[in-house]
Amino acid sequence: MDASNYRRVPLGVVSPRDADDIAATLALCRDHGVPVVPRGGGTSIAGQATGTGIVLDLTRHMNRILDLDPATRTARVQPGTVLDRLQEAAAPHGLRFGPDPSTHSRCTLGGMIGNNSCGTHSVAWGTTADNVGTLTVIDPTGRTARLGRDGAGAPDGLLDLVAGELALLRTGYPDLPRRISGYALDALLPERGTDVARAYCGTEGTWGILTEAEVHLVRTPPARALAVLAYPDESDAADAAAGLLTHRPLTVEGMAADLVPDHTTLPRGGAWLFVETGGTTPAEARAHADTIIRAADVTDSLVVTDPAAQRALWRLREDASGTATRIPATTGPAGEAWPGWEDCAVPPARLGAYLRDFRALLTDHHLRGTPYGHFGDGCIHVRIDFDLITTPGIAHFRRFSQDVAHLVVSHGGSLSGEHGDGQARAELLPAMYGPDLVHLFERAKDLWDPHNLLNPGILVRPHRLDENLRFAPLPHHPVDVTFGYPADDGDFTAAVRRCVGVAKCRTTTPPGQDVMCPSYRATGDDTHSTRGRARLLHEMLAGEIITDGWRSTEVRDALDLCLSCKGCRSDCPVGVDMATYKAEFLHHHYAGRRRPRTHYTLGRLPLWLAAVTRTRTTRIVNALASLPPAAALAKRLAGIAPDRTIPRLAPQTFSQWWTKRFRDRARAHERRRRTTPRPGPGLPSSHGLFPGSAGPTVLLWPDTFTEHLTPSVGRAAVHVLEAAGLTVLLPPHTPQRHGPIGDGTTRGPLHPRHLLPHPTRRTCCGLTYISTGQLDHARTVLRHTLDLIEPYLAIDGLPVVVLEPSCAATLRTDLPELLPDDPRAHRLATAVVTFAEALERHAPHWTPPRLDRPVAGQTHCHQHAVLGDHAEQRLRAAAGLTGTLSGGCCGLAGNFGFEKGHEDVSRACAEEQLLPAVRAAAPDAVILTDGYSCRTQLAHLGDRTGRHLAEVLAEALRTRPQDTGSDTP
């Protein structure tokens, strides 16, 4: 599969290392009559990167920039070169490659040439065909040719074919900037330089295999400004777009409110144009943007000059190809939307009229979709809620495609304005070009490829647009699963269908604040990308290639390197949640079978740690772990990597510290109670236990890591929360018979057992059970937890403060999805707050101590993906902690980094962002790592110690003169 609606099973995949490998593959396939399909990033929308023969994956090895010459503003690249790598190499010289599709972080130059891609800046710098020089290709006959102007590299007979059809070529093509459909044989006209390289662009791998490309680079403006223009709807925005072109902007992009769930940061309106301007200085770029705003008839506007804010806005536009696949319930039932009529183009002046007619056609067909795209070039993208599963739905899809093709042609447009025809539109080309020109395309194809070896069924003599649909083999009945999948109506098949191949998970550079997908960046293997795993799950459900279902070893091996970082849950534009899918798969895969050793050891860590505490053998365990022979034997038996250090257990658990502290306070409270009157009605009977903390009550969650491994984090959190005026409680160890403590309605005598945790029956989020797919155990643990905490859930507004981000994320998301029918699960998930959120929401007037120091470290991947870190950022700023934490994943990821066989990937993930950020930190910088895994990874691989934000603030409170708290952490 690619990013289209189509699926074709290849015989095999070849990853050539050089042109000789390509030639050898072509020769072998020619001898055996096996088709060949070249493939780059696999983000094609129309199905042209799929095939039934041999797929050439040009991204694994042929991905180098061979030369970059700033003087001539040219570069030579191999076809698998990712566009962003070229942009990074050209940027120091003030240069760039002009075309830039929204998939720029993973699309390849070869794929862009094959599709004649464009992107957001095409109004300024044109299409890929406008920016190529010479191309080196190997055609199916084995001939190596260097394509260029004056007929260079043309196969025998091609120029004679053109000479015999001059009139047809001069009159048969519509005149518009985004005419991508069909073969660009008009580039071979004498008056256009008989440019064979330009004609090759957009041939979608049907003429020859590209091995090297010389491309032109353009000067990039030193400064840019982004004008965001608001309009009532996208048709009004489209009407205005063409009029802005006279001001020579760099972009004129359009999108509607349907694609921006939270558009509070945008100017008031129902649709927007993103108009980028350039200049030699920021002031000049801003002035250019202001001129455009004055010339535009807008309801509201905004000019953004900050580069970071510009990137955030552009991300909205770039993610639209994914977010458009999920239709919100605001316009009817929520649903899935698909490509299939993805990127037609009309003359820019006719775009508004076309969009009105297109909307009317959607209504006539009872379909929904939200247009967006390159309004300045008249090119529209849209995902539509086709039914591509049932026979009537597929027939409807075909009828609509035929109707909309005639609509586009009636407006003088092109069926494809950027992504190529592929299988989705090639069948409809006669409606645009007529039979004579389409027949000419076939004759040209036969001259290049006389044996129809390259990508057959694409562009000429095409497959039907309604065959080879990727949904056909999927089961049409519900799959029995354990998680609730609320976003997909409980349908695991629908969850897997979420992956439409946008391939943002294949981004190869450090992702800034993003996380997805660390294992792909570590391995470079598509199998270990979020998309690759989703495709394997798709095949598992289809049952044609992977025939052993949940027992599949192929799926198991692909998921083995998934760190369950949850990054895809937030970073994937369509919200694929591979961590949940992995847990689901492991649950079924090992049902009734022996599991890996680490599932019994690390996966049941809370059980073993509680047993150590209960038997009071902490010192013995620590002593044995410090002896190399004993530690080596333990790691071997437990399945732990030999080079990992077994963490030391805390001599005193967090609950033991809390119990001693509580008893001391309880005794003091009892003495006061005997000598003072009882509190009046409505006052909490337990407040006397917490002198100086008469503020709101919070429930502090003693997670397994804080409880047994780093109780200093819990002690620090208690100190800070109480310093902020909050009353801190811990969950009980037995169900309450007298009502919850601390709500003012307690009946019966106060007894310490109501609040004291029990070492063997504690609350637990079930994280380690979930990550190893032991979902039955997880649900048992979670139900017990809900039984214990149920009285507190009845208290409106009582927050549950969770210090460990992974545990907080589990309670927020996994808990209600594992127990969807238990209302207590949803109440607890809603009550969960992070340490910073608790302070911000429930102690808003508290001022943290000032540290005035820089920070370095990493935002926990689960914090990024599920919880968000805005409250943490504000708390750090209030404390004078300056700087930004890195993104990515530390690579330890709970049990993952401890498991034997994961060492290299774990280290590679840490070396991507965490370790470089810490090494580059100033000597006085505070190293912040709120997650236990992050701190452990840093301790194992780095030379500095990470701390939780609570520890940093608690230390500062101890040294602040005005702090008089008596209980220090």
Image (cartoon, grey):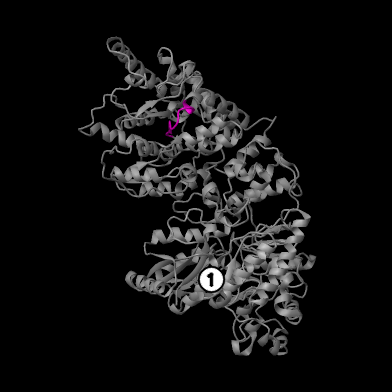
Question: Residue 367's spot in the image, x, y percent?
Answer: 67, 59
What is the magenta range? 792-803
In which quadrant is the C terminus drawn? top left
Q: Is residue 920 above or below residue 201?
A: above
Query: What residue do we see at 64% from left, 87% from top?
Result: 189
Residue furthest to the top: 674
x, y percent for residue 267: 43, 61
- Say few, some or many: other residues with alpha carbon within 10 Å of mark 1 (under 14 / 14 to 19 / 20 or more): many
Please provide percent x and percent y for residue 692: 28, 25
Residue at the location (72% across, 53% down)?
471
The residue lying at 34 percent from left, 34 percent from top is 951
Mark 1: amino acid: Ala
- In this figure, which residue is indicated by the disc labeled 1? 238
678 and 397: which is toward the camera: 678
Instruction: Provide the secondary structure element on which disc 1 rests.
Output: helix
- Residue lying at 49% horizontally and 16% vertically, measured from the top left: 737
| 723 relative to 466 in the view: left or right | left
Would residue 3 appear left or right of 731 to someone viewing this image? Answer: right
Q: Write down the quadrant of residue 710 in the picture.
A: top left
The picture places residue 868, in percent across and down from the top left corner, at 45, 45
User: Residue 343 or 331: which is nearer the viewer?
Assistant: 331
Decide if residue 512 is in sight here: yes
